[in-house]
Amino acid sequence: MSNNQLFVERRDQGDYAVRKEGSSRASAVAPTQAEAIAIAKELNPGVTPHVERVRNTIYGKRDKWRTP
């Protein structure tokens, strides 16, 4: 996996963190998942971020990664 890859994860506080794999601190925090995805795309243009699924769908279950 590329070192440039960003992940959007839901935090315990209910907001969303944008972070690199293995990092202990977030690069950015946003109140909504959509805003966090937009920030991730701004921070790393041309690379699609991995987004944590926050609910069960027909396409996958929560806590699995998806592309926006």
Image (cartoon, rainbow, N blue to C red):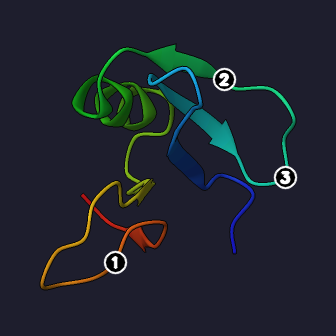
> SS of the residue at dot 2?
loop
Mark 2, residue position: 27
Left or right of 64, for residue 38: left
Mark 2 vs 3: CB contact within 8 A: no
Label whose residue precedes the other's in the sequence (3 or 1): 3
**Mark 3 to mark 1 CA distance (whole Å):** 23 Å
Dot 1, crowdedness within 10 Å: few (<14), some or many (≥20)? Answer: few
Horizontal arrangement in the rendering, residue 38 relative to residue 43 (left or right): left
Q: Residue at the left extreme?
A: 58
**x 38%, y 28%: residue:** 36
Disc sitting over residue 41 in the figure? none
- The residue sitting at 66% across, 23% down in the picture is 27
Tag 3, which secondary structure?
A: loop
Vertical placement of 63 versus 60: above or below?
A: above
Picture layout, residue 43 above or below residue 47? above
Q: Which mark is residue 22?
A: 3
Q: Earlier in the sequence, mark 2 or mark 3?
A: 3
Query: Closer to the camera: disc 3 or disc 1?
Result: 1
Three-letter amino acid code of the residue under disc 3: Gly
Q: Which mark is residue 61?
A: 1
Three-letter residue code for mark 1? Lys
* Percent coordinates x, y for residue 54 in the rendering: 34, 54
Q: Nearer the viewer, residue 9 or 4?
A: 9
Q: Quadrant of residue 25?
A: top right
Where residue 47 sits in the image (x, y, percent)?
43, 55
Cα distance in 3D space between marks 2 and 3: 12 Å
- What amino acid is found at the position of numbered circle 2 in the picture? Ser
Q: Nearer the viewer, residue 25 or 63?
A: 63
Q: Residues within 10 Å of mark 3 (few under 14, many from 20)?
A: few
Q: Is residue 19 above or below residue 38?
A: below
Position of 25 compared to 15: left or right?
right
**What distance separates the C-alpha of mark 1 from that of mark 2?**
26 Å
